[in-house]
Image (cartoon, rainbow, N blue to C red):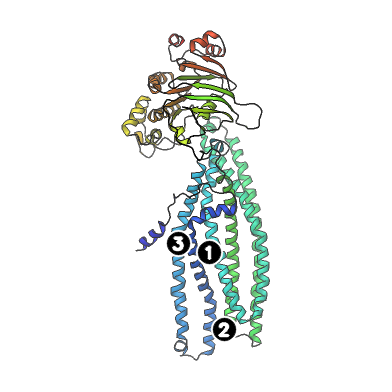
Amino acid sequence: MFNRVTSFFDHLYSPTALAENRQPPLGLKAFFIYFLDQFRAVFIVRFLLVAIGSVADAMMPIFVGLIVGMLSSTPPGEIFSTHWPIFLVMIGVVVVVRPTAFFLDTLVRNHAIIPNLVNIVRWQSHWHVIRQSWTFFQNDFAGRIANKIMQAGESIETAVNLAIDAAWYALVFLVVAVIVMAGMDPMLLVPMAAWGLLYAVLFVITMPLIARYSEELSEAKSVMTGRIVDSYTNIQTLKTFSTDGHEDAYVAESVTEHTVQFRRLMRVFTFMWSTLFVLNAGLVVSITWIALAAWNAGQLSTAAVATAVPFVLQIMNMSGWILEIGSSIFRQIGNVRDSMETIAQPLTMVDKTDAQPLVVDKGELVYDKVSFNYWRGKAGSVIDGFSLKVEAGEKIGLVGRSGSGKSTLVNLALRMFDVQAGSIRIDGEDVREVTQESLRQAIGLVSQDTSLLHRSVRENIKYGRQSATDEEMVRAAEQANVHDVITGLADPKGRTGYDAHVGERGVKLSGGQRQRVAIARVLLKNAPILVLDEATSALDSEVEAAIQEQLQTLMQGKTVIAIAHRLSTIAAMDRLVVLEKGRIVEEGTHAQLLASGGHYAQLWERQSGGFLDLEVAAQ
């Protein structure tokens, strides 16, 4: 029964639901409302249940006063027979109303709200952030971004639920207390009003400081996390260059900065608590003195004194609790504001509202007067007025020194960046006018920076085509000359072969093995346009020779752009295009370019060996 009840509340919301508007808004209030509005119904229920529980708690000092009054005015032996209706009400409030309200509130909070809200915030934030442009991720630490997404969910949930538990609960309680004490003696409200004013001033002074310092502390934590994760991600570089001392100093700097921010926040807490101790002492003494003086003058009954003193003691205890909760709320608000600045950034690389899926009939690729610079507003361009037409089924080799713009042209075709002038068209369709998903489905890429997901080999290869069968996957691995390697894999958890996990970014495989898995992935994808960006750069001569035939098979019937510093690997392409500073300086076949004695011929002379028959390549 208990499991069925909790399961009902557990499944009121799905943690992977998406909001109707997929763009989290900037602005702290709007950012909170964006997520909380999805839980509006259960929060309304929480407000009602907490109010009932608060009123029930406020009845306790009243019950104490009533009992003291009964004891002083009722002869022994008659208390139950005379006052049984009042006792029945007390029992009903204590045994039924209060436990029921708090039990239902616990179900709503712990099962309907907390796990679902925390992870909905994380999921929807991740869903939005993962669709940011490549530039967005290039300009930040992966660990820092992940930290902000993870903390946002907890911080929003904690801030809102604590506000209901403390602020709303305390407000209802204080309203009941003021009404009761005003009815007994209006003079009791004078010290309460003075205390309340000073308490409010303390709150107004300290809470914004806590929010601001917490935001700065959160940023310092994100930087520290980013640096630590960056060290782990690049652990091989750290080890091979023996940079422990330098790396220690780099991380220690962020730890020190985090500690400085932490100490500043703690000073606010120390001031806040010290001031509160003085205020509470004054409140208790003044209320008790006024109540006893009124009783001494015959103006207040014993029952009233017995009600007032517990009320003020409860308010005193509650004041510390509220400040503690309030400081926690404002710390969470600071965390949320810090996270919001990263999470809610508008997407810069979006499909047009009327974008249609790209349909590739032929595979013609045209660069039309394309210009691009990574740093807008800076002089010079990486690509400057570049025009090139790649016919359907044509094999093009891009040649040029490092930094000449070869990989940039590939990334522009994939719309990792948008061109700043000109256009790129596939079968006549501007790549900015079609959906990004369909565009990238039409292009198979094997890059020089091969990165695998920390998942099984099977998942990595099938990333090329999720619907592929295991037989198709194995065939692709065999064509990439990596099947035998995969069958011999085993990870620390005992998974073997295609089920073995490859480690973060594929670190458990050699560079050549990672590259062959990437080639298998693209073989399985079987896209009409193929881009080979140093596709065999991590392979040794023997392995490269073994898969050259498979690469030739892969290129059959496709439009191909191949980039290679090792010119022998692209010498047999239909046409070679030589780049220099983002411009075409030469183009033609291998033989034509050698005969012209220009840039390409100079590059060729500096290289020797290779995996293609040079005489054949020169024909």
List x then y, in percent, for residue 334: 60, 52
Q: Mark 3, residues whose alpha carbon is within 10 Å: few (<14), some, or many (≥20)?
A: many
Dividing the picture into quarters, in which one does residue 7 lie? bottom left
User: What number is the disc on residue 601?
Assistant: none
Q: What residue type is labelled 3?
A: Val
Q: Can residue 403 be seen by looking at this rendering? A: no
Callout 1 touching callout 3 (CB < 8 Å)? no
In the picture shown, does residue 272 fall above or below 290? above
Q: Which amino acid does label 2 sit on?
A: Ala
Dividing the picture into quarters, in which one does residue 135 lie? top right
List x then y, in percent, for residue 130: 50, 41
Residue annotated with mark 1: 165
- Label 1 or label 3, whichever lies nearer to me, is 3
List x then y, in percent, for residue 66: 53, 83
Q: What residue type is labelled 1?
A: Asp
Q: What element carries label 2?
A: helix
User: What number is the disc on residue 108?
Assistant: 3
Residue in front for this viewpoint, 618 or 543: 618
In the picture shown, does residue 20 fall above or below 586? below
Callout 3 touching callout 2 (CB < 8 Å)? no
In the picture shown, does residue 117 fall above or below 546? below
List x then y, in percent, for residue 182: 62, 79
Q: Is mark 1 on a helix, strand or loop?
A: helix
Q: Mark 2, residues whose alpha carbon is within 10 Å: few (<14), some, or many (≥20)?
A: many
Residue annotated with mark 2: 303
Question: Disc 3 versus disc 2: distance between alpha carbons?
Answer: 38 Å
Label 1 vs 3, first from the N-terminus:
3
